[in-house]
């Protein structure tokens, strides 16, 4: 995973996420900083006072959102214009109070169930340090792993992943952990000495950064990618392990998990094995059946199903 270099041109304009086009007009050439968009720049590395303006599609989680706003205000030059927006029920109703807490004078409007806040970055800011500490990557004692607010299941081991770890066999050869998160499944996979290579693939830069501490193994490579697109040269794998996501932008999206299943089939060689865990209500059987020679449900609980599928 390679991060782009920070920009220190005071004329540069920043963008975080993809706001609805009819709610915020993004200037041409805006620099993307969302950690969920592969190839974007890291806002943490952006020089203080180096941006002339920014539009932020604010994340829904409080710690993640305040962290993002604090980083943004640090990166903006004094007097620079900042537009922050979010759905009212996903943090939008809190934006004004949070920005005022940082010392901003806020102009707020409402459109299409969004709150839109516009500020000029003040000379003096307050409260940034607390927000930056609370939203930063850190060791989470309850799980003993490095993580960060905003990452999937950031402060607990997902129950589906825990179930898959419990039933995962010793794997061998070259494989991938698709949607690896902070590396819970990867650590279990690498317990097998017969694994020769493991690609950790995730759309979230922060999750991959956490795996640099959680998964310290020379057999590992990391790929920052959206698996709805082919992940580079990865192919001909002996196995794939995954807990596919089924939410996109906070809304349930069954097609996202189904896309993971199709991508797994593409990456596997003939007779390659896919192990996956899914919530019971998700209709993966119909997607698995035409792509794999055999599909076996290995475990079923009241909440989850674990499948082994051979290509």
Image: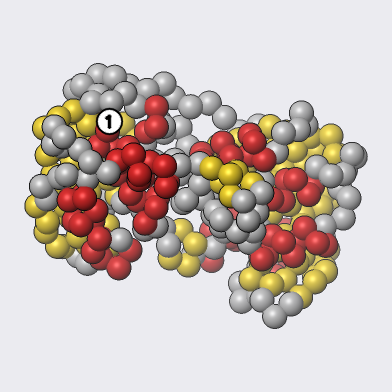
Residue 17 in sight in this render: no
Name the foreground residue: 243 vs 74.
74
The residue that appears at 74% across and 77% down in the rendered structure is 301
> Where's residue 221, x and y in %?
68, 32
Determine the residue positioned at 87% across, 55% down.
169
With 258 as the anchor, is 271 left or right in this view? Answer: right
Q: Is residue 304 left or right of residue 21?
A: right
Q: Please provide percent x and percent y for residue 27.
A: 20, 35
* In-front residue for pair 227/62: 62
Q: Is residue 160 above or below residue 24?
A: below
> Splitting the image into 4 quarters, where does residue 45 fall?
top left
**Residue 45 to residue 16: above or below:** above
Q: Nearer the viewer, residue 196 or 294?
A: 196
Residue drawn at point x = 46 percent, y = 58 percent? 248
- The local secondary structure at tag 1 comes to helix
Circle 1 residue: 75
216 or 168, nearer to the observer: 216
Report which quarter residue 302 is drawn in: bottom right
Q: Quadrant of the C terminus?
A: bottom right
């Amino acid at each position: 995973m390679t991060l782009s270099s920070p920009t220190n041109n005071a004329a540069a304009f920043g963008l975080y996420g993809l706001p609805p086009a009819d709610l915020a007009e993004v200037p041409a050439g805006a620099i993307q900083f969302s950690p969920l968009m592969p190839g974007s720049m890291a806002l943490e590395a952006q020089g203080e006072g180096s941006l002339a303006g920014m539009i932020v599609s604010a994340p829904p989680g409080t710690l993640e959102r305040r962290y993002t706003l604090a980083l943004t205000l640090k990166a903006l030059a004094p007097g620079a214009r900042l537009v922050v927006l979010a759905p009212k029920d996903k943090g939008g109703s809190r934006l004004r109070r949070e920005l005022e807490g940082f010392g901003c004078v806020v102009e707020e409007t409402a459109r299409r169930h969004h709150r839109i806040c516009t500020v000029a970055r003040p000379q003096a800011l307050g409260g940034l340090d607390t927000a930056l500490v609370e939203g930063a990557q850190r060791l989470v004692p309850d799980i003993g792993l490095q993580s960060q607010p905003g990452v999937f299941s950031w402060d607990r081991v997902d129950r589906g992943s825990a179930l898959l770890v419990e039933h995962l066999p010793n794997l061998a050869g070259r494989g991938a952990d698709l949607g690896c998160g902070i590396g819970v499944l990867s650590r279990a996979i690498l317990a097998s000495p017969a694994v020769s290579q493991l690609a950790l693939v995730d759309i979230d830069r922060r999750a991959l950064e956490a795996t640099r501490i959680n998964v310290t193994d020379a057999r590992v490579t990391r790929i920052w990618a959206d698996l709805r697109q082919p992940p580079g040269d990865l192919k001909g794998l002996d196995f794939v392990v995954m807990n596919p996501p089924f939410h996109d932008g906070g809304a349930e999206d069954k097609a996202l998990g189904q896309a993971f299943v199709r991508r797994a089939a593409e990456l596997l060689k003939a007779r390659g094995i896919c192990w996956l865990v899914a919530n019971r209500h998700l209709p993966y059987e119909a997607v698995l059946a035409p792509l794999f020679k055999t599909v076996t449900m290995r475990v079923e609980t009241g909440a989850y199903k674990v499948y082994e599928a051979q290509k």
